[in-house]
Image (spheres, rainbow, N blue to C red):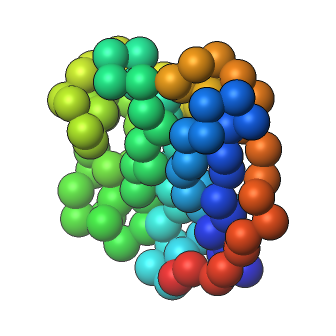
Amino acid sequence: MAVKKEMKCSSCGYKVDIYEGKGLFGQHIVQMTCPDCHTIQNLVVGGVKGDVAPSFNTEVGRLCLRCGSSWISKWNSHTCPKCGGEMEETGSKEFWT
């Protein structure tokens, strides 16, 4: 089962949706943080899209969806990219496919 959850920084209020589980077409979504634009980006990895475009089978070599930076890295699931504060679940959840 795949769930979308909202996270919010307790210090600055930055919000982002994160995705857990696998989607309808076998894809999963990886949260990457960008040190250049200070955001969290959700990258689709694998599934049907990965079968058609092999570069989508991994997050290696991918670029930030907002600014195009190549310096993105996996998000640690708790540090705010804007201010370094603590990201917490807001309780907002829904299913995604």
Out of 87 and 63, give the one closest to the viewer. Answer: 87
- Residue in view at x 19 percent, y 29 percent: 68
Asked if residue 14 can be seen in this view, the reply is: yes
Out of 5 and 13, give the one closest to the viewer. Answer: 13
- Residue in view at x 34 percent, y 59 percent: 50
Q: Is residue 62 left or right of residue 30?
A: left
Out of 9 and 67, give the one closest to the viewer. Answer: 9
- Residue in view at x 21 percent, y 30 percent: 67
On the image, the x and y values in percent for residue 77 come to 70, 36
Query: Is residue 23 placed above or below 34 in the rendered structure?
Result: below
On the image, the x and y values in percent for residue 15 come to 56, 48
Query: Is residue 53 placed above or below 25 in the rendered structure?
Result: above
Q: Is residue 92 left or right of residue 62?
A: right
Examine the image and state in which quarter residue 23 appears: bottom right
Q: Is residue 76 left or right of residue 88?
A: left
Which residue ends up furthest to the front in the rendered image?
A: 12
On the image, the x and y values in percent for residue 42 come to 45, 49
- Residue in view at x 54 percent, y 50 percent: 16
On the image, the x and y values in percent for residue 2 come to 66, 75
Asked if residue 77 can be seen in this view, the reply is: no
Q: Is residue 49 left or right of residue 94?
A: left
Query: Is residue 84 placed above or below 24 in the rendered structure?
Result: above
Out of 73 and 24, give the one closest to the viewer. Answer: 73
Query: Is residue 1 placed above or below 40 in the rendered structure?
Result: below
Q: Quadrant of the N terminus?
A: bottom right
How many dots with numbers? 0
